[in-house]
Amino acid sequence: MAAVKEQKRVFSGIQPSGVLHIGNYLGAIKQFVKLQYTHNAIFCVVDEHAITVPQKPQELRRNTLNTAMLYLASGIDPKEAIIFVQSQVPAHTELAWILNTITPLGELERMTQFKDKVQSQAKEAGVFAGLLNYPTLMAADILLYRTDAVPIGDDQKQHIELARSLAERFNNHFGNTFSMPEPLIEEDTARIMSLQDPTKKMSKSDDNTKSYIHLLDTPDDIRLKIKSAVTDSGKEIVYDRKKRPAISNLISIYRGYTKMTFKEIEDQYKEKTYADFKNDLAEVIIGELAPLQKRFQELSADKTGFEHILRDGARRAKSIADTTLQDVKQKMGFFI
Ligand code: AQP
């Protein structure tokens, strides 16, 4: 029997700043797939966020379509959820501008992701205002759909807090308009770390290609990347984030794909070596990614059908977003 959907709305997005990796999948997309059956779900490819760091036009276009295709290939069903590209719904940037006028500068400057990206961007291309304002645009994305819950990885928690505080500030000032979004975080896989440096989050934009596994990596690439993943000193396969961050990261990935508990994994590998565990982990990932990659190839062959899904998604999203925006503008005293 089909699950009865709650009226509660979930919204989330991923920026097409590269090819999606297993951290994006285990931290976010896996939750999207589950939630679409129980919630009123909207998932967005947030291309306007991607341009807060320099993007090459052709790559941005390709990554945007690939991200949307990976949503579908991962199991997001356009009959269950709205899927669309952010820049096709202009209300996002319009509400972001309005929210900018009630966003304290100090809160934006305190954002961890901003501080991290300033470090890496400053050396390369310089830092632009869009990077600072990223969390306000994210708040607009979420609040436009009167979202109740936002499935995200751990790194986005601070941004949801800002969205909540802006919703509260706006509601207090202009009357009840926005709902209060809650973060939905899958604790065990909320922060998959780099395979080369377990103190750093796995990131699409990492220059070291061995630090992440793309959802479209070949089996040979996956075997090589897992084999060359750093490990801790010692040889036991034991989950302990503080003392053994590298092997714990690999165990989290294993858990994310097999649904085994940490204890079950530790028991299974009690007498085994890091090499045994890594070989098995690589095969688990390869096996889990195979159907997704097959579906991705099928979708790539039907560009017209796929683009129709995105245009229809944008049309549906726009109708919800425009209603909220009109309400906001009316309450603020704009001439409408
Ligand atoms: N390493 C991760 N572990 C778990 N979840 C993660 N997410 C990202 N990295 C991990 C979650 O994936 C969703 C989409 O993220 P995003 O692309 O919008 O932004 P991000 O968090 O900045 O992701 P990346 O991969 O690190 O991209 P770049 O390198 O471009 O900044 C979010 O829910 C995020 O939490």
Image (cartoon, helix red, strand yellow):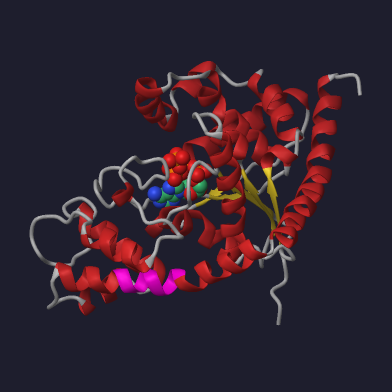
Residue 151, how many percent across, how many down? 55, 52
Does the magenta segment cover residue 178?
no
Residue 115, how many percent across, how many down? 39, 26
Q: Can you name the residue that lies furthest to the right here?
A: 336
User: Above or below — where is 270 with respect to 216?
Assistant: below
| Front-lying residue, 113 or 324 | 113
Q: Residue at 15% across / 76% down in the picture?
A: 270
Residue 192, how many percent across, how many down? 36, 53
In the image, is 53 to the left or to the right of 277?
right
Q: Residue 120: which quarter of the image?
A: top left
Q: Can you name the residue that lies furthest to the left here?
A: 234
Q: On the rendered image, what quadrant is the N terminus found in? A: bottom right
Question: Secondary structure of the magenta portion, mostly?
Answer: helix
In the image, is 98 to the left or to the right of 248?
right
User: Above or below — where is 136 with respect to 208?
Assistant: above
Q: Residue at 84% across / 32% down in the picture?
A: 327
Q: Which residues are magenta?
A: 282-289
Q: Residue at 22% across / 62% down in the picture?
A: 227
